[in-house]
Image (cartoon, rainbow, N blue to C red):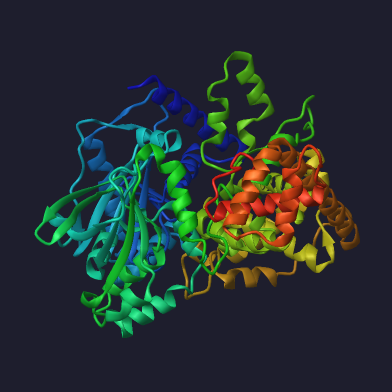
């Protein structure tokens, strides 16, 4: 066992204890949240809802992966194994058998009316058991997933699939080593090895689309619809590269046309559909009398065409649709693992660049995230009460930036970094989406989980950025941090309440804040986010208002309509939010007195936009001048040759190319930077270091 893994174990264990202490939770709850957040980010689960049940009679469950109706008929049950030893323990085959037996027992008991009736109706366990029973006729596969901070014994080489009442059951294990590989090394998932000849209907004819001397390998492939559906049925969403998986969630109505073609003109699918763009680490090929064929893929990923793939799989479950007449074109690029981090996102971005929703690249490289990262590295938060120095909130626009930033620091430098950037103030893109979406009136979407919420957030912010990017200024960032502070404070408030009996905390927190936002807007007032930023905390009056809101929304959340007895799923519905918005709450007078008027808020926003425009101009001019005249001459020549630049852009780039004789203005520099960005999207490789 490596020392690196042991160090990771200790750090993760301390993170769990710190999160439990900060949020007033049990360590087991914090373990579930932190561990499952990584599993969801990996894509192994779409969401992870807490629903704990323990019984001395050999039954246990800790959560589930969403409603099977929205997960293509898959029922995912999560069981947790939290080891509180200071050293890593081993997870043996005997342990696995006992753990999976407990969750299997819960599954079986969920179909027993007597067992369900014995559970408290407001408990998460009842909601889960009731949902399993209601959805069972439509469940097509069961997945039992174990999360554990023990290490899987080397003698455990897998677990055979089983059946329960005719439904296939598979088992998956995330141990501490797999978590480490994903969190630190970026490879938590098991390899996707697809044996076309052995399991998926036979080899695929392929046309090479590369030169042997090019250092690049690519193929054009025609895939039968039945074969693509079978591969997706086995591997599911793991086939979809993460950016695409999130992006396609924001494009709910794109697949209507796909479904229509599959149902009415299946033989025309190849002609009407753009097909899929895919990558793989390697392929197995052989030459036949009919030409080259691919017999297997290693780590196949669909980077464009996720809707096509998922829709064909959905159609395969309908008897009236004949997939034998459906064929799909695939553009396949072979990407070595060490180049995947850089190359795959670019393939995904360019493949999606003409999609109707302009949020395909709303991920780590989107300028919104770059700007948020810049603010987080520059702006120090005021010193909190009892401290003599300020700190920073560290924004991870790409996973692993925080550990990378401190990895090579030693001694006093690492201590200084940790003091300036405390781990408790690290937040990710999905965290930011959660903090902001509740204030935008979407607690129902936030309750659907990190990925679906981020997809909705991406769509909203992407559209707003294209209209007025100056709105996302330093004030916006400070207010975002204030919202993070409020969110985490409400988590502590809810846990401490006498009426809180465990379960649904995430839903109560989201709705409590959203209700505050809704009612303050209705009053024509606004929360003083600048005050929260300066204090790095909330006032006593604000805490009282949030407590009042939490108790009121809790009553709505835990009392779903008779037609929906699963509280967690009820909280995901627009109807739940509608009921909360109609609540009449008597707000504390002291808190109402702290609110800003609309006029005060608008004045603050105007000042922030003006400052951001000034800042953008200075940054653009600095970048243009630093690059120098020679670089801009080459860039201008490339754009002129390709006939991409407008006359205005050509003239401004001529001014840039004349440096140092002539220095372009701030406005001219902003136009030059925008033009360069468009040239890059058209394939220009010059000036990559400028933007």
From this viewpoint, which residue is outermost toward the left? 289
User: Do we see residue 50 in this rendering?
Assistant: no
User: Do we see residue 523 in this rendering?
Assistant: yes
Q: How many marks?
A: 0
Taking the image as shown, residue 334 lies to the left or right of residue 399, namely left
Give the camera-side residue of 217 and 661: 661
Q: Quadrant of residue 436?
A: bottom right
x then y, percent, for residue 527? 80, 55
x then y, percent, for residue 447? 55, 59
Q: Is residue 543 above or below residue 4?
A: below
Identity of the residue drawn at 20% across and 75% down: 324
Quadrant containing the N terminus is top left
Give the camera-side residue of 370 and 442: 370
Identity of the residue drawn at 76% across and 65% down: 519
Q: Quadrant of residue 325?
A: bottom left
x then y, percent, for residue 119? 41, 59
From this viewpoint, which residue is outermost toward the top? 411
Q: Is residue 505 above or below residue 393?
A: below
Q: Quadrant of residue 359?
A: bottom right
Taking the image as shown, residue 604 lies to the left or right of residue 191, namely right
Identity of the residue drawn at 38% across and 34% down: 176
From this viewpoint, which residue is outermost toward the bottom? 264
Give the camera-side residue of 136 and 458: 458
Q: Is residue 51 above or below residue 223?
A: above
Quadrant containing the C terminus is top right
Give the camera-side residue of 266 and 49: 266
x then y, percent, for residue 524? 84, 66
């Amino acid at each position: 066992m490596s020392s690196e893994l042991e160090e990771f174990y200790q750090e993760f264990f301390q993170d769990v204890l710190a999160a439990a202490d900060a949020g007033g939770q049990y360590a087991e709850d914090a373990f579930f949240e932190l561990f499952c957040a990584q599993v969801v980010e990996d894509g192994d689960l779409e969401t992870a809802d807490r629903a704990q049940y323990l019984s001395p009679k050999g039954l246990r469950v800790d959560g589930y992966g969403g409603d099977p109706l929205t997960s293509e008929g898959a029922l995912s049950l999560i069981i947790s194994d939290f080891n509180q030893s200071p050293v890593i323990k081993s997870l043996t085959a005997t342990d696995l058998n006992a753990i999976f037996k407990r969750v299997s027992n819960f599954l079986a008991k969920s179909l027993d009316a007597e067992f369900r009736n014995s559970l408290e109706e407001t408990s998460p366990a009842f909601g889960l058991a009731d949902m399993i029973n209601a959805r069972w006729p439509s469940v097509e596969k069961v997945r039992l997933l174990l999360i554990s901070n023990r290490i899987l014994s080397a003698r455990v080489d897998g677990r055979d699939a089983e059946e329960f009442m005719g439904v296939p059951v598979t088992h998956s294990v995330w141990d501490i080593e797999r978590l480490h590989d994903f969190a630190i090394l970026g490879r938590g998932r098991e390899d996707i090895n697809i044996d076309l000849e052995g399991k998926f209907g036979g080899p695929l004819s392929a046309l090479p689309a590369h030169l042997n001397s090019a250092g690049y390998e690519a193929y054009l492939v025609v895939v039968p619809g039945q074969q693509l559906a079978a591969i997706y049925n086995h591997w599911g969403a793991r086939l979809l590269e993460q950016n695409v998986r999130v992006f396609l969630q924001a494009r709910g109505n794109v697949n209507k046309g796909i479904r229509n073609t599959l149902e009415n003109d299946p033989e025309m699918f190849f002609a009407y559909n753009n097909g899929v763009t895919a990558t793989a680490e390697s392929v197995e090929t052989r030459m036949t009398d009919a030409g080259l064929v691919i017999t297997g893929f290693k780590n196949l990923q669909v980077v464009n065409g996720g809707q096509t793939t998922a829709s064909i799989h959905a159609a395969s479950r309908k008897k009236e649709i004949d997939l034998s007449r459906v064929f799909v074109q695939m553009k396949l690029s072979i990407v070595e693992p060490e180049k995947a981090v850089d190359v795959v996102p670019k393939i995904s971005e360019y493949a999606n660049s003409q999609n109707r929703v302009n949020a395909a690249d709303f991920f780590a490289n989107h300028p919104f995230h770059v700007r948020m990262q810049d603010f987080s590295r520059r702006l120090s938060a005021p010193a909190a009460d009892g401290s003599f120095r300020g700190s920073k909130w560290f924004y991870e626009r790409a996973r692993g930036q925080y550990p990378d930033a401190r990895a090579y620091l030693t001694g006093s430098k690492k201590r200084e970094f940790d003091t300036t950037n405390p781990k408790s103030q690290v937040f990710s893109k999905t965290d930011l989406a959660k903090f902001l979406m509740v204030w935008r009136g979407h607690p129902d979407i936030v309750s659907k989980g990190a990925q679906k919420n981020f997809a909705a957030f991406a769509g909203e912010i992407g559209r707003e950025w294209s209209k007025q990017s100056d709105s996302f200024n330093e004030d916006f960032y400070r207010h975002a941090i204030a919202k993070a502070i409020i969110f985490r404070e409400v988590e502590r408030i809810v846990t401490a309440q006498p009426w809180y009996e465990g379960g649904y905390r995430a839903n109560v927190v989201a709705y409590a804040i959203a209700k505050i936002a809704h009612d303050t807007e209705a009053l024509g007032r606004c929360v003083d986010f600048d005050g929260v930023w300066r204090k790095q905390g909330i006032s006593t009056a604000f805490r009282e208002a949030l407590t009042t809101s939490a108790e009121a929304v809790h009553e709505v959340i835990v009392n779903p309509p008779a037609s929906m007895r699963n509280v967690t799923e009820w909280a995901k519905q627009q109807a739940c939010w509608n009921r909360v918005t109609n609540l009449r709450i008597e707000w504390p007078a002291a808190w109402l007195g702290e609110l800003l008027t609309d006029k005060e808020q608008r004045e603050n926003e105007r000042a922030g936009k003006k400052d951001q425009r000034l800042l953008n101009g200075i940054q653009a001019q600095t970048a243009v001048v630093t690059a120098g005249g020679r670089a801009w001459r080459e860039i201008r020549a490339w754009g002129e040759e390709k006939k991409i630049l407008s006359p205005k852009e050509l003239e401004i780039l001529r001014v840039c190319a004349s440096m140092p004789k002539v220095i372009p203005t701030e406005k001219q520099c902003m136009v030059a930077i925008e033009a360069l960005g468009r040239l890059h999207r058209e394939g220009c490789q010059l000036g990559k270091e400028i933007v």
